[in-house]
Amino acid sequence: MTEVVKQVVRTLEVELGERSYPIYIGPGLRHQAELYRRHIPGRQVMVVTNETVAPLYLQDVMEALDGFQVASVVLPDGERFKTLEVWQEIIDTLLQQRFNRQCTLLALGGGVVGDMTGFAAACYQRGVPFLQLPTTLLAQVDSSVGGKTGVNHPLGKNMIGAFYQPRCVIGDTETLNTLDQRQLAAGVGEVIKYGLIDDPEFFAWMEQNMDGLLQRDPAALVYVVERSCRDKARVVAADEKESGQRALLNLGHTFGHAIETGMGYGEWLHGEAVAAGICMAADLSRRLGWLSAGEQGRVRALVQRAGLPVAPPHELGRKRFLELMAVDKKVLAGKIRLVLPKGLGHSVVTDAFDPQILHDMLDEYRTS
């Protein structure tokens, strides 16, 4: 590791036995050749990025990979392109370039690029290494960590994929400076989730520091990425394949995925849909007596301060919501399970609620 890296990098470890890997966090890390080299076992590297990120950062990464046999594939940008058809472009390029089983894939972009690259790495020649270099706040705090990879299907989000861990995650917080405000806020939606799941101190910190975060204070950005990754790494280490505790990370996602699918992928950003889903979960918890009105109000107020939606779109009625929620991966034996807060900083995965209360809530959103 160079002296520059020692001065700025924060390192966390995702503890998964032989699949353990580090998360590096700090500004300017994309330039640090040594961070890549220690995790690339062969000579061939395929950089997967998109049309928005490539003009900004692809050249920096290619220069840092000097000495390797490097190729790249540039995908269209947007959630609507997270499909098997677009994913196949990665596989096609690997084959056209005659990449072998010792090659490494490097995901340079947001959550869509990371998910598709990881899925390609899991499938190509039955599995090759990959690295994550996330360039959005949402990807740095959530999707790049934990090994969930895949693509969407018209009937459901992320229904095709695999658990496949990266060799490392390089979280260059400097790349967040080129995000537009909507994308930055979308990442905050995932950050709020961590405070509600099991980190009440983090939730309180966000209430005090939201303005600085939205103004891209460098210290606030590094702190938020590090704290979020610590929270997620702890959960993933305890439940890698989501057989129990890891499902808590889906707070707001059952509602949120229904919004994304129902409205058409890309109409709502993932973080926007999750934020509305978090508010819906808090609303349902209040109706069940698990949250006070004051606690629900704090959740809603924090989401509003981030500039995120606090309610679902009027276009989705109860029937459509329930149809979409029925294909959620947490559904068991035909029963919808939701992640719901029981106080600020403690959430549970449960089907122990009266479905009529859920139905009434969904009807009220349609008519309000």
Image (cartoon, rainbow, N blue to C red):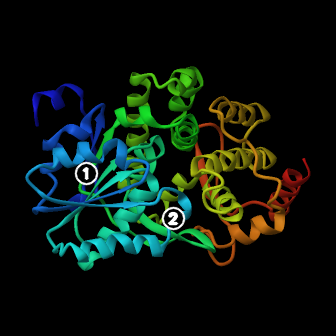
Element under disc 2? helix
Depth order, front residue of 226/289? 226
Q: Which mark is residue 81?
A: 2
Q: Which mark is residue 230?
A: none
- How many numbered callouts? 2
Q: Amino acid at mark 1?
A: Cys
Task: Please identify, in this view, whether the residue under mark 2 or under mark 1 is nearer the observer.
Answer: 2
Q: Is residue 147 left or right of residue 158?
A: left
Coordinates of residue 279 in the picture (x, y in percent) = 71, 44
Whether residue 239 appears in this view of the structure is no
Number of other residues with Cα within 10 Å of mark 2, as a class: few under 14, some 14 to 19, many 20 or more: some
What is the spatial separation of the Cα atoms under label 2 and label 1, in whole angstroms?
25 Å
Whether residue 367 appears in this view of the structure is yes
Coordinates of residue 203 in the picture (x, y in percent) = 56, 31
Above-or-below relation of 77 to 175: below
Q: Quadrant of residue 165?
A: bottom left
The residue indicated by pointer 1 is 168
